[in-house]
Each structure stands twice: as C-alpha cells, then as structure tokens.
Amino acid sequence: MPILGVIASAITGNLVTTAYQSIATVTVGSGGQSDITFTSIPATYKHLQIRGIARTGGANERINLTFNSDTASNYSMHRLVGNGSADSASAQSSQSALWISSGYDGVSNTANTFTAYVLDVLDYTSTSKTKTLRALDGLDKNGSGGIEFSSGGWFKTPEAITTISMSIQGGATFAQYTHFALYGVKG
Amino acid sequence: MAAGATYEPIATATATGSQSEILFTGISQAYTDLVIVVQATESGADGLIMGVGNGSIDTGTNYSFTVLRGNGSAASSYRVPNYDAAQIGMVNSTINSIIVHLQNYSNTTTYKTMLTRGNNTNWSNNQVYSSVNLWRSTSAINQINFKNGSIANHTAGSTFTLYGIAAA
C-alpha cells in the first residue's frame, strides 16, 4: 500500500505564507508575441523570481534578457550545460543582453513541448550592487534537448531594476501558451 | 499589476519504512506550478522515479529525461527517451535532497516539463544531479507518485512535500 500524502489543511500549525508573492503574469495568445516585458516592478521585495515555459514557432534559439531596457554591452554570463551526451561550460562578456538557455536548443519549436525556466534576480532594488541573475532551465524532446545552469551579471552602474524584458534571439516570436510569471520574495 | 501571496504547502508525506510508493492524489488545480521537496533515504540504490497522471498514474512510456551530473572530478550528461516515469534523482541509503519544479501542471494545453536538482553525498557519479523531464500529455496533473527504480522502500522518516505556486 502506498503512503498517502496528508492534505495541508489537515495539518495543525502555522501554514500562512506571505513572503512569496505573485506580481504579474504574461500568457501568450494565439497570435504569438515578440517580447515579454514586466514593467513598473514594485520595489517592495528583496528578490525576484521568474518562472515560466516557452515555445516558439520559429527556429530554436536562446532568450535574450535585459534589465531596464539597457541594450549596451553591460552583460556577462557563465553556464554549465548537459545535452544528453556530453557536458560543457562556456562564457561570454560585454554582451547586449543576458543569454538564457543558450547552451542547447533553447526555446522549443516542437509542438506541445516547452522549455522550462526558473530565474532568480537577487537584491534587485540595490543601488550599490551589480545585479546577478541565476537560471535553471531545460528542454527535453524525447530524444534531444538539454539542461543548463547559468549565472549572469549586469555591469551597468548599479540601479534598481524596474523592467525585465525577454525576447528570442533572431526575432522569432513566443508561441501561444508561452507563460512567464514574476514573483517577489520579501526580505 | 496584481499581487498576492502564494507558495503554499499542499500536502506532505513521511515514509514509515515499509512502503515502496508515496502517492499524492486529488492535487488541487488552483495553482500554476508545483514545487516538490524530497528529503529521502532508500533501502536500495537506484533512480528515484516520479509518475504523474490524471485520475491514475501514467505508467506508459510517455516520459523522457536528460541529466547533467557531477561527482567532484567530472561532469557528464545522458538521456533516456520513452521511459515509464520521470527520473528526479539517483538515490541510496545516504540522504538525498531533491527539489522538483513541475511547471504549468494544471493546464490542459501543453506537455509537461519538470526541472529537478538534487544531491547525494555518497554516490560516486551522482553527487550533484539535475534533470529535465518531459511527460508527453496535455492532461492536467492531479496525481503524483514516487518510487525507487529497484522497488526498494523509502526509509522511515523520508519526507515528500508538495507546494503550490499560483500566478497572478
């Protein structure tokens, strides 16, 4: 006999959670969408997390992510990738955006199959620290795909992040049902 | 922008030592993502596999996964297509800590992708383990189970906790 999980409402004690809050969500409709942008991000949290899934009707490519619409050469990144047969590590500096899911197929272009993302932006309101982003993302297509850990820095003179934008390298659009949600973590 | 508190505990299970399966049924559809935290030891060494389904656990070969792992001196990667469950970690009698991100589990329009990362302090090739898993079904997920690939028992005190995250 399996052990059945206990529904949380049956557990005594404090289950109230208020430190992790949903801020905004973008779900792409049937016409597709060229970019996904969170604007006017409130400064009332300590950290941000972006969770999502993405697919494109275009070619497999990475996501380019920018802060505060800055497209100057202020971004650097490192990654560790597994592609199902080998591991690899690589890096870039002085780029116009952070590269996300760049070490494998990137955004899926296979029907029904989506690349998954969990992105963390720490201390995003600081005006004295260079901002870093930590990413875990992956895509499995039953025979191809990959998984990637990456970290990136935004080396512009430190400023609070109020806008986060994502687009697909090469100009392809995000396909229907692509979904990204922005969360704030209290400090 | 809307805002609301989320990341809520949905359910938890603690192994007694005599069962090989942990099963969650009737999982609420009120969330967007699930996060599952596993802190487990096993009576046998093998993959910790996770089945999902709607109304019952899908045991068909509708899963596939890609792994990236490291053992302190080298990293490696491998892939398994057409498997009968997701593989979220490699487990044995040493404590295994695993976090699973099950994205958009309640939608009925996409195949489901899961990201995992975990560690095992005493398995030669799997001391750090991560995987991306695909379940080729557009069904919403309302059941999840956890088994050892060798049908070994989950050791008493092993915990499996589900959290729900709702998007605005």
Image (cartoon, helix red, strand yellow):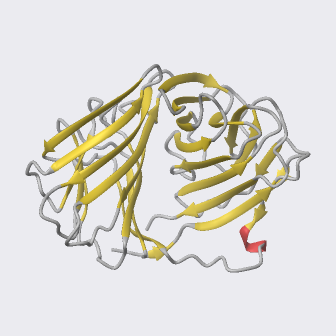
Residue visible at 68% across and 58% down in the picture:
B161
Residue visible at 52% across and 58% down in the picture:
B32
Task: Name the outermost residue toward the front.
Answer: B73
Q: Position of residue A7 (x, y in %)?
A: 75, 65
**Residue B28 in the figure: left or right of residue A168:** right
Q: Give the answer, above or below, for where A156 lies relative to B75.
A: below
Quarter-of-image position of residue A114: top left
Instruction: State how many labels appear.
Output: 0
Residue B123 versus residue A46: which sits nearer the camera? B123
Quarter of the image where the N terminus of chain B is located:
bottom left
Q: Position of residue A153 (x, y in %)?
A: 24, 52
Q: Position of residue A109 (x, y in %)?
A: 35, 31
Quarter-of-image position of residue A160: bottom left
Q: Position of residue A183 (x, y in %)?
A: 41, 66
Residue A4 versus residue B32: which sits nearer the camera? A4
Residue visible at 17% across and 41% down in the picture:
A93
Quarter of the image where the C terminus of chain B is located:
bottom left
